[in-house]
Amino acid sequence: LCILRTLSTSDDVEDRENEKGRLEEAYEKCDRDLDELIVQHYTELTTAIRTYQSITERITNSRNKIKQVKENLLSCKMLLHCKRDELRKLWIEGIEHKHVLNLLDEIENIKQVPQKLEQCMASKRYLNATDMLVSAVDSLEGPLLQVEGLSDLRLELHSKKMNLHLVLIDELHRHLYIRSTGRVGQRGRDRGRIG
């Protein structure tokens, strides 16, 4: 500003030329000094420029990634808002499928009950047989009551339940009356021999 004022206030062309010459000389000196400083500090300057470029690139990449993340979040928010009813429907379907799978597993286990029951009866494990049979009948009369395909199995297990009831009564009768009286009779005979 000072130079402009000097040049504009000066009426003499020679003063203006002198001022212009001084300016050009100062400009050339500054240019030379700058070149010398660049040569002296070339490695530091190059490192600083590269570091600045790297930082600038990272900042730009980070801004782009943040912008992309914001866009993705907005998109997800819109999709979730739009698909809420569909998600609820899928969740309910998932629960229904899980329930159906549990019922199928239960049916598969109940279908094996007659065979397992025969094995328990053959080895006289009446408590296991009773527990298994009662559990199977409860399932068939409860959650599986509406399954038409299990009606034959339901009838078979009811029949086996009645048979098991008769077998248990027969076993109790045998233990209480036949074995007990047999032991009492044996004791009486043993006393007779001793006496």
Image (cartoon, rainbow, N blue to C red):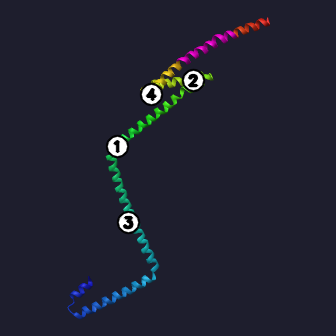
Residue that mark 4 sits on = 149
Mark closer to the chain start, 4 or 3 = 3
Mark 4 against mark 3, which lies toward the viewer? Answer: 4
Residue that mark 2 sits on = 129
Q: Residue 8 vs residue 67: left or right?
A: left
Mark 1, other Cα within 10 Å: few <14 / some 14–19 / many ≥20? few
Q: CA distance from mark 4 to mark 3?
A: 68 Å
Q: Is residue 128 visible?
A: no
Q: Residue 10 vs residue 168: left or right?
A: left
Mark 1 against mark 2, which lies toward the viewer? Answer: 2
Q: Quadrant of the C terminus?
A: top right
For this rendering, which residue is in front, 33 or 194? 194
Residue at 34%, 50% in the rendered image? 77
The amino acid marked with disc number 3 is: Thr
The dot on residue 86 is 1
The amino acid marked with disc number 2 is: Ala
